[in-house]
Image: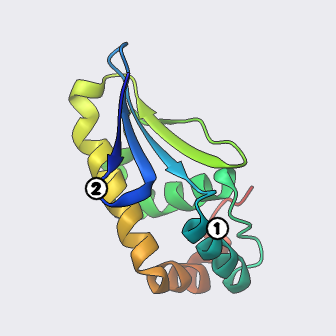
Amino acid sequence: METSNYPNRDYLFIMNHDDGSVALSFNIEDDDILALGEEMNEVWEEAYMNGYNWEAFLNYYLAVNAPEILEDMETDSEAGSYVAYYEDGAANEGKVKRLADIIVSLVENKEEIFKIFREKGNEIEWD
């Protein structure tokens, strides 16, 4: 397995597995991401940002803004992490990189997240 940090982001990893699959791991226990999660919870009470609620939020966001990324995507989230993967890594490596770009954009533009919460928070299937 080959693992690499997303450039300059300690909370994102892209993993190319020996079986040909590719995965993105979003470490939501990173200090900056935990702090963001607390802010998100202040804006929307149901948004306790564990791995399952990051999955709920990202699934909602992707369905609206980039539904093609959801095609063939599987998730394996836990309380402390969000993981998205594709069995056919060669065909889907671009999707993983685009998903990483989307996560970075959202993390760095938290006001966009807060706007979504205020306008559409009740449409997200929270854990």
Residue of label 2 = 7
Closest to the observer: 108 or 94? 108
The picture places residue 72, in percent across and down from the top left corner, at 39, 32
Foreground: 8 or 115?
Answer: 8
Label at residue 6: none
The kind of secondary structure element at disc 1 is: helix
Give percent across and percent down for residue 88.
31, 22
Viewer-proximal residue, 79 or 12?
Answer: 12
Q: Residue at x 45, y 82 (%)?
A: 112
Question: In screen coordinates, is 8 left or right of 39?
Answer: left
Q: Residue at x 45, y 71 (%)?
A: 107
Which amino acid type is shown beneath numbered disc 2? Answer: Pro
Q: Is residue 102 above or below residue 42?
A: above
Label 2 Cα neighbours within 10 Å, binned few <14 / some 14-19 / many ≥20 = few
Q: How is the image coloured?
A: rainbow
Q: Is residue 60 above or below residue 43?
A: above
- Quadrant holding the C terminus: bottom right
Residue under label 1: 34
Residue 77 percent coordinates (x, y): 62, 42
Quarter of image, res 122: bottom right
Q: Which of marks 1 and 2 precedes in the sequence?
A: 2
Q: Amino acid at mark 1?
A: Leu
User: Residue at (36%, 47%) from the top-left corner?
Assistant: 5
How many marks do you count on the picture? Answer: 2
Query: For the residue labelled by badge 2, is the local secondary structure a helix, a strand or a loop?
Result: loop
Mark 2 to mark 1 CA distance (whole Å): 20 Å
From this viewpoint, which residue is outermost toward the top? 19
